[in-house]
Image (spheres, rainbow, N blue to C red):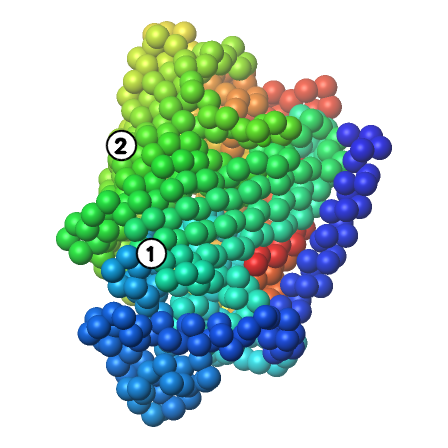
Amino acid sequence: MDGPTSNPRAVALLLSFLLLACGGTAWGQAPQPTGMRLTELSDEPPAVRLTACDAICPPICDGQGDGACDGQCGGEAGPACDGGCGQAKAGEKCQCKRTSCCCGALVDWSKVPLGIRPMPRPGNYPNPPTGCGYYSFADLLHDQPRLKPQPSGYPSFALMPPSFYDADFRYVEGINPAERTLVERLKRMPLTDCLTFSTGGQFWIRYMDEYNSRLSERNNDYALTRVRMFGDLMYGDRVRLFGEFLWADSLWEDLAPLPIDENRGDILNLFVDLKLFDYDGAPVMARVGRQELLLGSQRLVSTLDWANTRRTFDGARVFRRGEKWDVDVFWTAFVPAQASKLDEWDENREFGGAWVTHRPKPGHFLDFYYMYLENANNQAPMNLPVAPTNVNTFGGRYTGDKNDYLWDVEMALQFGDQTNQDLFAGAVTAGAGRHFKNACFNPTAWIYYDYASGDANPNDGDAHTFNQLYPFGHYYLGWLDLVGRQNIHDLNVQMYFYPQHWITVWLQYHHFWLNQGADALYNAGGVPIRRDATGSSGTNVGDEVDVIVNFHLARYSDLLAGYSHLWGGGFLEATSGPNQASNASLFYLMFQQKW
Ligand SMILES: [Ca+2]
Ligand SMILES: [Ca+2]
């Protein structure tokens, strides 16, 4: 891995890292000079402003357009709004609402693209601080406390599970074009009355130092780099074309890179959205093409953002997001990342389902789902007949909060067949938490029990190992990624606190033990990594502690640092190799910049 070809690549990536780091700081800290420079460079900045403002009350949309302007602009209006709205009320902050006439229909661009979905509450969710404070390190440097975080379509955390296609920058429509940041200027660019274009992306670099990496009894220290870039073309509110490019690479690995480490140039998303019709006041959309999937708690279906390559699918999806009910129906094939050639769907791995979410009130989520997975590939790792398999998953979840008490319960049952054996398996999660909102550092604490069934005998005609599908296991079952949601019990406590508004500290303790001693320990990828077929090594996997600290450096950049340690239990001691390595640990340091 240390061949001569690695080094120029490493140097180039490190240079781009430094450039981005400097550029990122400038974006976050000094919006005014950046804006001035942009104005100077721009061909016709006044025309841009006029276009945005003229569109507020398009003269050709008689009657309909007028309503969009009433009372929207006020005395503080900048040049972008003056003259655009005749009905300004003094003292109101300018709220430019861009509308245009596209093929005879009025488009309210503040609602486009339709179908954007905020991330559903995951399990063991934090409660970020509110009120006056420094929301980024840049705020601290400039001694600029704020009452709330600056608006952004991106989260103020290094990891971003939602897809870029769900990054909600519609708020930019309400900002005077002259006051937008560079990142905001890349969003919502009007091309014609019908077309608006957005672009953006992310760079990250992560140093990893793993002791007993993957329980292989070897150490691995390496770096992961990733670049993502997207383009989003909206044709009115009826059609959307979204594409995203990914470059993921790893450097200096002492072990063979994992399939989720490298993908040197590929398509992460490329789809068309069509608005089919309105149902009960909300649009029903069809999405066809390559698309990431994220559903519910992400215990079963996630984009897997910790993985350098993320995770994607080819297929079709019909969905609706309403005020209280969301519905998704999808049929896809999994697209495994291939490091050095273009990714293709695996026609042997079909994945589909129907997912309904009900939100009786804000923060409360009730999920009901059915999913079908077919894996027609022959797989028998560690003498375990895993596939071909057909898995039908029925499940549900309820999460919410009341008076700062938090809860989260999820259960799934699986039926089907696995290598001609009858499959019956299940998983249960139950968690309770408390948000101590008046305590110092705004802590939130959770206690959880996770269970996923295992199989006592792989050859007795019945299969009982739960299939974890396509989860965000890293988020739930320890950041060492040594434990997956298969044949496992996990009793865990988690705690978040914020020494400053811009610093997230997240602590986890897990006690893992196998459900069936003769079944394997499956890692976060669902791959068996240790097994005693006799079951005589017991079930005690061990205890893991995770410390995760996120520094929100500036509006779009973060530094993530962490340490995880596993004290191997009797099962890992008895199944260790010649080096008797049963403990494992991981240190990592990551910088990420979005734009
Ligand atoms: Ca590829
Ligand atoms: Ca069995």
**Which quadrant of the frame does ligand 1 lie within?**
top right
**At label 1, which amino acid type do we have?**
Gly
Name the residue carrying label 2. Answer: 370
**At label 2, which amino acid type do we have?**
Tyr
Front residue of 570/200: it is 200
Name the front one of labels 1 and 2.
1
**Which residue: 31% across, 80% down?**
72
Number of numbered labels in the structure image:
2
Q: Position of residue 131 (x, y in %)?
A: 44, 76
| Secondary structure of the residue carrying numbered label 2 | strand
**Which residue: 74% across, 57% down?**
18
Quadrant including the N terminus: top right
Q: In the rendered image, which quarter is residue 248 located in?
A: top right
Q: CA distance from mark 1 to mark 2?
A: 33 Å
Mark with earlier residue (1, 2): 1
Residue 176 lies left or right of residue 29; in this view the side is left
**Which residue: 41% across, 61% down?**
192
Residue 568 lies left or right of residue 357; in this view the side is right
* Residue 236, numbered circle: 1
Q: Position of residue 266 (x, y in %)?
A: 57, 36
Q: Residues within 10 Å of mark 1 (few under 14, many from 20)?
A: many
Image vertical order of residue 365 relative to residue 516, above or below: below
Residue at the right extreme, as displayed: 4
Q: In the rendered image, which quarter is residue 68 located in?
A: bottom left
Image vertical order of residue 421 relative to residue 351, above or below: above
